[in-house]
Image (cartoon, rainbow, N blue to C red):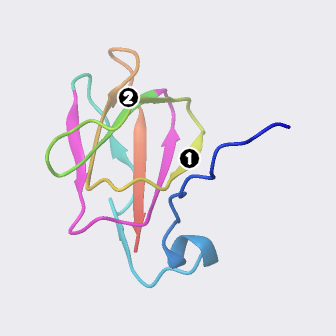
């Protein structure tokens, strides 16, 4: 007879993420033009439940960070791509994927 391990406890998303109802949002107030070196795009006042990223014109490299400056992951996004992250980060750092191009990024943090 096969025995399976006990199920592990799973991370549960906050209620706002599960219901897709957020009460507050912080944004870059439109698209921000990126440079060729890493730059802090937005420093949230808290830790958003969901972060929405939108890139236009050229590809961008985006690094979400915690308040302690720990890099969570590095994401390369194509022009015209959007992405929703449910990570506990408070800082978004970004740069152009190709030097000399001017990617534009919009960030929305929802609480």
User: Nearer the observer, disc 2 or disc 1?
Assistant: 1
The front one of 60 and 103 is: 60
Where residue 83 is drawn, which disc sits there? 1
Residue at (49% x, 79% y) in the render: 22
Give percent across and percent down for residue 55: 50, 41
Where residue 24 is drawn, which disc sits there? none
Which residue is most to the top? 99
- Crowding near pointer 2: few (<14 within 10 Å), some, many (20+)? many
Which residue is most to the right? 1
59 horizontally vs 90: left or right: right
The front one of 56 and 67 is: 67
The front one of 61 and 71 is: 71
What range is drawn magenta here? 38-59
Give percent across and percent down for residue 61: 39, 28
Where residue 102 is drawn, which disc sits there? 2
The numbered mark, 2 or 1, whose residue comes first in the sequence reads 1
Residue at (53% x, 58% y) in the render: 9
Above/below status of 56 relative to 109: above
Above/below status of 42 relative to 56: below
Give percent across and percent down for residue 5: 65, 43
Give the spatial CA distance, label 2 vs label 1. Answer: 19 Å
Q: Secondary structure at mark 1?
A: strand
Q: Secondary structure at mark 2?
A: loop
Residue at (56% x, 81% y) in the render: 21
45 is within the stretch colored magenta: yes
Mark 2 in CB contact with mark 1 (< 8 angstroms): no
Residue at (32% x, 59% y) in the render: 28
Above/below status of 15 relative to 42: below
């Amino acid at each position: 007879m096969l025995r399976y391990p006990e199920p592990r406890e799973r991370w549960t998303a906050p209620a706002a993420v599960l219901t897709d109802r957020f009460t507050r949002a912080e944004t870059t107030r439109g698209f921000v033009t990126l440079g060729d070196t890493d730059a802090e795009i937005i420093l949230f006042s808290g830790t958003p439940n969901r972060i929405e990223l939108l890139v236009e014109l050229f590809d961008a490299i985006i690094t979400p960070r915690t308040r302690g400056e720990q890099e969570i992951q590095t994401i390369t996004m194509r022009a015209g791509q959007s992405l929703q992250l449910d990570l506990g980060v408070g800082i978004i750092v970004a740069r152009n994927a190709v030097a000399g191009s001017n990617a534009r990024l919009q960030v929305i943090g929802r609480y």
